Image (tube, grey):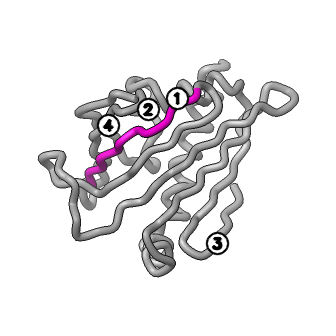
Amino acid sequence: MTIEVKDNKIIFTRTFEASINEVFKAYTTKELFEQWFHPQSAKTKVFKFNVVEGGEAFFAIETSEHTSYTLTEYKTINQPYHIEYLDFFATPQGEKDTRLPGMQVYLDFEAQDGNRTTITSTSIFPTKEAAEGALNMGVEAGMNATLDQLDALLKNKKS
Protein backbone atom coordinates (compact mmCIF):
# COMPACT_ATOMS: atom_id res chain seq x y z
CA MET A 1 0.00 0.00 0.00
CA THR A 2 1.14 3.50 -0.69
CA ILE A 3 0.01 6.59 1.19
CA GLU A 4 0.24 10.19 0.08
CA VAL A 5 -0.74 13.26 2.07
CA LYS A 6 -1.71 16.42 0.16
CA ASP A 7 -2.88 19.28 2.35
CA ASN A 8 -6.27 18.06 3.71
CA LYS A 9 -6.27 14.79 1.72
CA ILE A 10 -4.99 11.32 2.60
CA ILE A 11 -4.66 9.06 -0.44
CA PHE A 12 -4.16 5.30 -0.12
CA THR A 13 -3.47 3.04 -3.11
CA ARG A 14 -3.33 -0.76 -3.06
CA THR A 15 -3.57 -3.52 -5.66
CA PHE A 16 -5.36 -6.82 -5.05
CA GLU A 17 -5.16 -10.13 -6.88
CA ALA A 18 -8.87 -10.21 -7.70
CA SER A 19 -11.26 -8.94 -10.35
CA ILE A 20 -12.73 -5.47 -10.12
CA ASN A 21 -16.18 -6.99 -9.57
CA GLU A 22 -14.96 -9.13 -6.64
CA VAL A 23 -13.28 -6.16 -4.96
CA PHE A 24 -16.25 -3.86 -5.50
CA LYS A 25 -18.60 -6.52 -4.12
CA ALA A 26 -16.48 -6.77 -0.94
CA TYR A 27 -17.20 -3.07 -0.31
CA THR A 28 -20.90 -3.21 -1.14
CA THR A 29 -22.18 -6.54 0.24
CA LYS A 30 -22.98 -6.62 3.96
CA GLU A 31 -21.91 -10.24 4.50
CA LEU A 32 -18.52 -9.67 2.86
CA PHE A 33 -17.96 -6.22 4.40
CA GLU A 34 -18.44 -7.65 7.91
CA GLN A 35 -15.72 -10.21 7.22
CA TRP A 36 -12.93 -7.76 6.43
CA PHE A 37 -13.63 -4.12 7.32
CA HIS A 38 -11.62 -4.15 10.55
CA PRO A 39 -8.08 -4.82 11.75
CA GLN A 40 -7.09 -8.39 12.59
CA SER A 41 -8.50 -9.65 15.92
CA ALA A 42 -11.36 -7.12 15.70
CA LYS A 43 -14.81 -7.59 14.24
CA THR A 44 -17.36 -5.50 12.40
CA LYS A 45 -21.01 -5.51 13.37
CA VAL A 46 -23.32 -3.92 10.78
CA PHE A 47 -26.62 -2.40 11.94
CA LYS A 48 -27.61 -0.77 8.62
CA PHE A 49 -26.08 -1.33 5.18
CA ASN A 50 -27.77 0.30 2.21
CA VAL A 51 -25.01 0.93 -0.35
CA VAL A 52 -26.99 2.90 -2.92
CA GLU A 53 -26.97 6.58 -3.85
CA GLY A 54 -28.67 8.31 -0.92
CA GLY A 55 -28.31 5.21 1.28
CA GLU A 56 -26.58 4.85 4.64
CA ALA A 57 -24.49 2.38 6.56
CA PHE A 58 -24.10 2.27 10.33
CA PHE A 59 -21.65 -0.17 11.88
CA ALA A 60 -19.37 -0.82 14.83
CA ILE A 61 -15.78 -1.99 14.86
CA GLU A 62 -15.15 -3.91 18.05
CA THR A 63 -11.66 -4.52 19.44
CA SER A 64 -10.61 -5.88 22.80
CA GLU A 65 -9.92 -2.28 23.94
CA HIS A 66 -12.96 -0.40 22.64
CA THR A 67 -15.80 -0.12 20.14
CA SER A 68 -15.99 2.66 17.54
CA TYR A 69 -19.10 3.49 15.54
CA THR A 70 -19.27 4.81 11.99
CA LEU A 71 -22.08 6.40 10.01
CA THR A 72 -21.67 6.49 6.24
CA GLU A 73 -23.82 8.46 3.78
CA TYR A 74 -23.46 7.25 0.17
CA LYS A 75 -23.47 9.99 -2.47
CA THR A 76 -22.41 8.28 -5.73
CA ILE A 77 -22.20 4.62 -6.74
CA ASN A 78 -20.85 3.76 -10.20
CA GLN A 79 -20.48 -0.01 -10.13
CA PRO A 80 -17.77 -1.35 -10.27
CA TYR A 81 -15.61 1.76 -10.66
CA HIS A 82 -16.42 4.37 -8.05
CA ILE A 83 -18.01 4.97 -4.65
CA GLU A 84 -18.29 8.38 -3.02
CA TYR A 85 -19.49 8.76 0.55
CA LEU A 86 -19.39 10.91 3.66
CA ASP A 87 -17.90 9.19 6.70
CA PHE A 88 -18.54 10.21 10.30
CA PHE A 89 -17.74 8.90 13.74
CA ALA A 90 -21.05 8.02 15.35
CA THR A 91 -22.67 7.45 18.71
CA PRO A 92 -23.80 3.93 19.68
CA GLN A 93 -27.31 5.07 18.70
CA GLY A 94 -26.23 5.85 15.12
CA GLU A 95 -26.14 9.65 15.38
CA LYS A 96 -23.20 11.68 14.02
CA ASP A 97 -20.58 12.38 16.69
CA THR A 98 -19.91 16.04 15.99
CA ARG A 99 -16.93 16.18 18.36
CA LEU A 100 -14.75 14.74 15.58
CA PRO A 101 -14.62 15.90 11.95
CA GLY A 102 -16.16 13.81 9.22
CA MET A 103 -14.56 13.25 5.85
CA GLN A 104 -15.53 12.81 2.24
CA VAL A 105 -14.19 9.61 0.69
CA TYR A 106 -13.70 8.72 -2.96
CA LEU A 107 -13.00 5.06 -3.75
CA ASP A 108 -11.81 4.42 -7.28
CA PHE A 109 -11.48 0.84 -8.56
CA GLU A 110 -9.29 0.19 -11.60
CA ALA A 111 -8.98 -3.17 -13.36
CA GLN A 112 -5.38 -4.19 -14.09
CA ASP A 113 -3.92 -6.90 -16.30
CA GLY A 114 -3.89 -10.40 -14.87
CA ASN A 115 -7.19 -10.21 -12.94
CA ARG A 116 -5.91 -7.57 -10.53
CA THR A 117 -7.59 -4.46 -9.19
CA THR A 118 -6.11 -1.24 -7.84
CA ILE A 119 -8.09 0.78 -5.32
CA THR A 120 -7.36 4.44 -4.75
CA SER A 121 -9.02 5.79 -1.61
CA THR A 122 -8.99 9.57 -1.23
CA SER A 123 -10.16 10.90 2.14
CA ILE A 124 -10.81 14.64 2.19
CA PHE A 125 -10.92 16.28 5.61
CA PRO A 126 -12.30 19.73 6.44
CA THR A 127 -8.79 21.03 7.21
CA LYS A 128 -5.15 20.06 6.91
CA GLU A 129 -5.06 19.82 10.73
CA ALA A 130 -7.95 17.32 10.72
CA ALA A 131 -6.05 15.15 8.21
CA GLU A 132 -2.92 15.35 10.38
CA GLY A 133 -5.04 14.42 13.40
CA ALA A 134 -6.27 11.29 11.61
CA LEU A 135 -2.69 10.33 10.79
CA ASN A 136 -1.68 10.90 14.42
CA MET A 137 -4.58 8.66 15.52
CA GLY A 138 -3.05 5.81 13.48
CA VAL A 139 -5.23 5.83 10.38
CA GLU A 140 -2.35 4.54 8.23
CA ALA A 141 -1.74 1.44 10.37
CA GLY A 142 -5.48 0.88 10.69
CA MET A 143 -6.03 1.12 6.95
CA ASN A 144 -3.10 -1.21 6.26
CA ALA A 145 -4.43 -3.80 8.72
CA THR A 146 -7.96 -3.51 7.33
CA LEU A 147 -6.81 -3.88 3.72
CA ASP A 148 -4.75 -6.91 4.78
CA GLN A 149 -8.07 -8.43 5.90
CA LEU A 150 -9.59 -7.63 2.49
CA ASP A 151 -6.60 -9.22 0.77
CA ALA A 152 -7.02 -12.39 2.87
CA LEU A 153 -10.75 -12.53 2.13
CA LEU A 154 -10.18 -12.20 -1.62
CA LYS A 155 -7.47 -14.88 -1.57
CA ASN A 156 -9.72 -17.26 0.42
CA LYS A 157 -12.50 -16.83 -2.12
CA LYS A 158 -10.12 -18.20 -4.80
CA SER A 159 -9.26 -21.33 -2.81
Residue mark closest to the camera, 2 vs 3: 3
For label 3, the crowd category at 10 Å Cα-Cα, with few meaning under 14, some 14 to 19 and many 20 or more, is: few
Q: Give the distance between the C-alpha atoms of the residues marked 3 and 1, in whole angstroms.
A: 28 Å
Q: Secondary structure at mark 3?
A: strand
Residue 57's disc is 4
Q: Residue furthest right?
A: 113
Report the amino acid beneath label 4: Ala
Residue mark closest to the camera, 2 vs 4: 4
Question: Which residue occupies 54% across, 24% down?
Answer: 25
For label 1, the crowd category at 10 Å Cα-Cα, with few meaning under 14, some 14 to 19 and many 20 or more, is: some
Q: Position of residue 139 (x, y in %)?
A: 48, 64
Residue ID for mark 1: 26
Magenta span has 133? no
Kindly indicate whether the residue at mark 1 contacts the one at mark 2 (C-beta within 8 angstroms): yes
Q: Position of residue 75 (x, y in %)?
A: 43, 39
Question: Which residue occupies 67% across, 19% down?
Answer: 158
Report the amino acid beneath label 2: Phe
Q: Secondary structure at mark 4?
A: strand
Q: Earlier in the sequence, mark 2 or mark 4?
A: 2
Q: Secondary structure at mark 2?
A: helix
Q: Earlier in the sequence, mark 2 or mark 1?
A: 1
Residue ID for mark 3: 6
Residue ID for mark 2: 33
Q: Position of residue 49 (x, y in %)?
A: 32, 30
Q: Earlier in the sequence, mark 3 or mark 1?
A: 3
